[in-house]
Amino acid sequence: MLWPCLLALLLSQLNFLCAARPGPGPNFLLIMADDLGIGDLGCYGNRTLRTPHIDRLALEGVKLTQHLAAAPLCTPSRAAFLTGRYPVRSGMASHGRLGVFLFSASSGGLPPNEVTFAKLLKGQGYTTGLVANCFLMADFTITQQPTDYKGLTQRLASEAGDFLRRNRDTPFLLFLSFMHVHTAHFANPEFAGQSLHGAYGDAVEEMDWAVGQVLATLDKLGLANNTLVYFTSDHGAHVEELGPNGERHGGSNGIYRGGKANTWEGGIRVPGLVRWPGVIVPGQEVEEPTSNMDVFPTVARLAGAELPTDRVIDGRDLMPLLLGHVQHSEHEFLFHYCNAYLSAVRWRPHNSSSVWKAFYFTPNFDPPGSNGCFSTHVCMCHGHHVTHHDPPLLFDIARDPRERHPLTPETEPRHGEILRNMDAAARAHVATLEEAPNQLSMSNVAWKPWLQLCCASKPHPLACRCAGDG
């Protein structure tokens, strides 16, 4: 049995060396769910939701078990994903109560001087594409009419397939960003009522079907072996999301505490699946800390693009870890932000099996004893909504992933030394931050009718009407 394993490893290294040569690198299919919990997928332990197509990526690639969103809310997390930088660096992290864009007709956004992986790859001759309905979040917030979006998931899968077919002979990067499973939930008739978890489960299973359609297209076009596929969620599941009758409309964060909008593990630990047949040995699990910011330098390096040298890039190339060239993540420290506020620090010492996590503040769950902030719908990041800790609240995530047992000088002899090292790292990190315009200020976030997108297929009560709409 040893020889097949050695042969597979040798072939993977040869393929990787070929891909690293000058010239076109692999294709990239980057898939991001919205509000999907790490406990919602079969490959991460769920036994009641059916996600065979997403689980296939874990079987045929690498499953990251300590993959982390750079922020626990969609706007800052996606900004970090696109740029490889903590969102506070680009002003995409709020200092107020509102931490996301609610409307498509807002004036804030990623500053034009930021560099995304799409921009880097265009410079390398790649065709880049975005298939997404992120802007529909505003429509859902306003109308709460999921029937308005009948066929939406099918259209996403179809448009992704069209992009792949149009670009089968050129190097490409496709970012497929699902509306699922953010509320309000919707599912076509063939999925509605079919899961064991109500409207939420139906949406998860429909999204899995769409992922399967896109993977099947890759197979049919003969593109699978030259395409790196990455799947993740923008942050943890929304535990406070309830239906009109009190039924749960959010997902599962598995064993992890908290969820969307806070930096307990349930808010930031997300699925992370990477498949590249013939290069990445299938069926692996990587337990080292990784971040959604890592996609930026990984994609850039594989495509032969130079990283920007005029700014701090916080992500790290994943390939040495995925290929087994190194045993430890390059992220010795990671910093967890709640909006623009540094909430916690993570430390993975290379000479230890521990993963330390120190909280400077934690949210006040309401009602007390619950697992979320139900009175405010999501947890807030400042003021009377949080409890500050001095000394910081310390956990060893490797031994206590549920974050139930804070360490003390009595239970951890190196308690003081560990916190001093983490505080020094936090201070050094903060020293690298430069002031950035607040993209999530109230003036930027406010709805502006003159910026509202037209919708020719279904005019919205608050949308403009284009010429030809009638």
Image: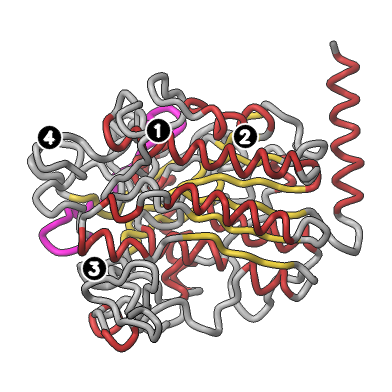
| Residue 395 belongs to magenta span | yes
The residue lying at 49 percent from left, 47 percent from top is 154
Quick check: 92 above or below 139?
below
Instruction: Kindly report which numbered mark, 1 or 3, lies closer to the viewer in this rendering.
Output: 1
Q: Secondary structure at mark 3?
A: loop
Precedes in sequence: disc 4 or disc 2: 2
Amino acid carrying label 1: it is Glu
Check contact, mark 4 vs mark 2: CB within 8 A: no
Judge the density around disc 3: few (<14), some (14-19), many (≥20) Cα neighbours within 10 Å. some
Instruction: Kindly report which numbered mark, 2 or 1, lies closer to the viewer in this rendering.
Output: 1
The residue lying at 64 percent from left, 58 percent from top is 174
Quick check: 144 above or below 401?
below
Real-space CA distance between mark 1 and mark 4, rounded to the nearest whole angstrom: 39 Å
Question: Residue 313: where, in percent of width, then height?
Answer: 60, 68
Real-space CA distance between mark 2 and mark 1, rounded to the nearest whole angstrom: 24 Å
Q: Nearer the viewer, residue 355 or 31?
A: 31
**Residue stretch rendered in magenta on the structure:** 381-401
Residue at which label 1 appears = 190
Q: Nearer the viewer, residue 335 or 141?
A: 141
| Residue 208 belongs to magenta span | no
Q: Is residue 220 visible?
A: yes
Residue at which label 2 appears = 57
Residue at which label 4 appears = 369
Amino acid carrying label 3: it is Leu
Precedes in sequence: disc 3 or disc 2: 2
Residue at which label 3 appears = 98
Q: Is residue 35 left or right of residue 379?
A: right
Real-space CA distance between mark 4 and mark 2, rounded to the nearest whole angstrom: 37 Å
Precedes in sequence: disc 2 or disc 1: 2
Splitting the image into 4 quarters, where does residue 430 fall? Answer: bottom left
